[in-house]
Image: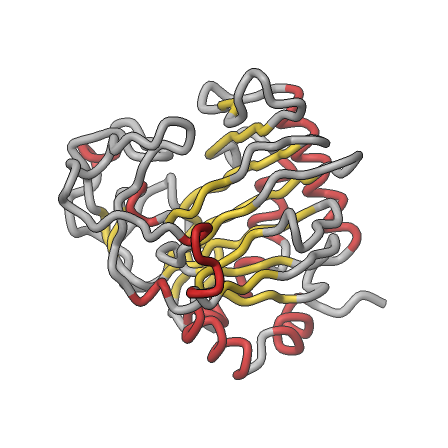
Amino acid sequence: MVDSVSERVARAVTSATIDDFRRDGAVVIRQIFTQDEVALLGRGIESNLKTPSPRAKVASRPDDPGWFFEDFCNWQENDAYRDFIFESAAPAVAGALLGSETVRLYHDHLLVKEPNTRQRTPWHQDQPYYNIVGGDNVSMWIPVDPVTRESTLEFVAGSHLGPWLMPRTFMDNQAKWFPEGSLADLPDVEADRAAFPIVGWDLQPGDMVCFNMLTLHASGGVSGQTRRRAFSVRFVGDDIRHAPRPWRTSPDFPGLAESLPEGAPLDHPLFPVVWQNA
């Protein structure tokens, strides 16, 4: 018999888990998803790969022997994604980690690295690419394939406490969001890894990592016959507010600036409530 969502969350998200998340900005949660939930997500990913959205992009270079594919904001068209987001344990975990009264979906993000993909995901924070401000947020990175320590997400523990760092394009390192010089540049973590409190975990289907949108993170490529399909879903809590930008955010939400005032909560159909404190 499969435990209920509330039973699974109560067992997996302890007070120590919450303390680790708030201190380090990243935490691993083991075997929170059932085999059926992982299979549902896998079906959604394969459907997404067959019918990419207009927002999809290839994030690896043409000479890369592998292939790094990303797509965004597909929950409204992808039935499996929508069912996973609304029915799995993910929203309740977000509520437990954030301690918010209400949790809203911010967006979904597919990341697939096919075997022999050399392309790294460089060190970055997520929130500077977005159109929101506030600290009550959590990104969940959920693999449907086993992930080795070499290919997993890594985090600089405590980096979510600030400051915001300059967001840049991954392929050519351009500042296309905040004006050049307006934010501090990222430190060169790879040049002196021992100087940073780097954490990361090998993962199995059913596991996930949860992290704050300001936590500095990166990942490697994949080797051999390894396939790395991961679904990331971002949730926001009580203090998150709309922060329209004069530039195109990643992802973009066309028309949102005209319908949702600056400083307003994300009370909009694009960001449905997925969990509320009972």
**129, 12: nearer the viewer:** 129
Where on the picture, by quarter, is residue 268? Answer: top left
* Image x and y of residue 54, in percent: 46, 19
Residue 211 picture location, percent across and down: 47, 60
- Furthest residue in direction front, as rendered: 191
151 vs 149: above or below: above
Residue at the image point whose x is 56% and y is 33% from the top? 119
Classify residue 8 by image quadrant: bottom right
At horizontal 26% and vertical 47% (from top left) the residue drawn is: 185
- Report the number of numbered marks: 0
Q: Nearer the viewer, residue 178 or 212?
A: 178
Horizontal side of residue 111 vs 54, given as left or right: right
Above or below: residue 71 compared with residue 262: above
Residue lying farthest to the bottom in this orientation: 15
Residue that sits furthest to the right in the current view: 1
Residue 208 location (% of width, % of height)? 62, 58
The relative height of residue 251 versus residue 237 in the rendered view (above or below) is: above
- Looking at the rendering, which quadrant does residue 17 occupy? bottom right
- Residue depicted at x 63% and y 55%: 88
31 to the left or right of 48: right
Q: Pinpoint residue 238: horizontal percent, then vertical percent.
A: 31, 64
Front residue of this view, candidates 224 and 153: 224
The quadrant of the rendering that contains the N terminus is bottom right
Q: Is residue 94 left or right of residue 133?
A: right
